[in-house]
């Protein structure tokens, strides 16, 4: 792979490859993706793609790890309001369903058990610290912070593209999404709040668009 600075034309080609390959991998997975389709749609050639990414695995890595970073940056955790964090994750899955599909292919084709990525590539340290601090402050129920985080993420994905019950889309009526947000917010709050009664109104009531 080249590590030389890209020209403006090279940067545009690089981004086209990423955009096209994201769709290709999201639809077909790692094994099913075809470099020929990617370079044709990106208006480039195999030599250019390999110069940038090394091989198909390297291209998937660039897209997959970029998607993990996007989730962290676009939907930062707020451990004082984990219910609202779950709702914001729900909204991000609506905006970018391809990101969830990429993670699913990585799970199916690379890591059927254990963590989805190697320890050096995990991006959950800040999340786990934030949850642990909220637990220490008496805001979040006790338990392994990783398990708390995993449960919230799973709840946020109830209607995602990987649901085996129903996959939501951004084209559905706004009131349908609002009903789900309300249910998700209340359910997460009841599940993780240190308030054992679990009956009070969630502390935020905010929507991701607020």
Image (cartoon, rainbow, N blue to C red):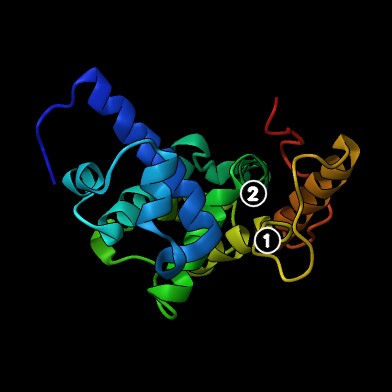
Q: Secondary structure at mark 1?
A: helix
The residue labelled by disc 1 is 155
Q: Residue at x 29, y 61 (%)?
A: 57
Q: Residue at x 44, y 37 (%)?
A: 73
Give the Cα separation between the discs numbered 2 and 1. 7 Å
Residue 76 point in image, percent of width and height: 49, 39
Q: Secondary structure at mark 2?
A: helix
Would you say 47 lies left or right of 165 here?
A: left
Q: Quadrant of residue 72?
A: top left
Q: Residue at x 36, y 33 (%)?
A: 15
> Within 10 Å of the Cα at label 2, are there few (<14), some (14-19), or many (20+) other Cα atoms?
many
Residue 180 point in image, percent of width and height: 82, 49
Residue 139 point in image, percent of width and height: 60, 50
Q: Residue at x 35, y 51 (%)?
A: 65
Looking at the figure, which quarter contains the C terminus? top right
Would you say 99 lies left or right of 124 here?
A: right
Depth order, front residue of 205/132: 205
Mark linked to residue 86: 2
Q: Quadrant of residue 203?
A: top right
Would you say 200 lies left or right of 47 here?
A: right
Depth order, front residue of 39/123: 39
Depth order, front residue of 58/79: 58
Labels 2 and 1 touching (C-beta < 8 A): yes
Q: Residue furthest bottom?
A: 113
The number of numbered discs placed on residues in the rendered structure image is 2
Label 2 or label 1, whichever comes before in sequence order: 2
- Whether residue 124 is visible here, answered yes or no, is no
Mark linked to residue 111: none
Would you say 152 lies left or right of 65 here?
A: right
Residue 136 point in image, percent of width and height: 48, 54
């Amino acid at each position: 792979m080249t590590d030389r600075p890209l020209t403006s034309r090279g940067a545009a080609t690089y981004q086209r490859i990423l955009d096209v390959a994201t769709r290709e991998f999201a639809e077909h997975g790692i094994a099913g993706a075809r470099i020929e389709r990617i370079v044709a749609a990106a208006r480039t050639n195999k030599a250019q793609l390999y110069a940038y990414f090394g091989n198909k695995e390297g291209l998937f890595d660039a897209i997959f790890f970029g998607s993990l970073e996007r989730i962290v940056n676009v939907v930062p955790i707020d451990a004082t309001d984990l219910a609202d964090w779950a709702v914001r994750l729900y909204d991000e899955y609506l905006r970018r369903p391809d990101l969830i599909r990429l993670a699913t292919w990585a799970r199916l084709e690379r890591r059927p058990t254990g963590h989805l990525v190697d320890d050096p590539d995990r991006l959950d340290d800040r999340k786990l610290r934030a949850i642990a601090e909220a637990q220490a402050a008496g805001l979040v129920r006790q338990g392994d912070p990783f398990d708390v985080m995993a449960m919230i993420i799973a709840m946020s994905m109830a209607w995602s593209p990987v649901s085996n019950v129903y996959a939501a889309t951004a084209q559905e009526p706004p009131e349908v999404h609002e009903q789900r947000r309300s249910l998700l917010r209340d359910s997460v709050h009841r599940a993780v709040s240190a308030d054992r009664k679990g009956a009070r109104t969630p502390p935020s009531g905010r929507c991701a668009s607020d």
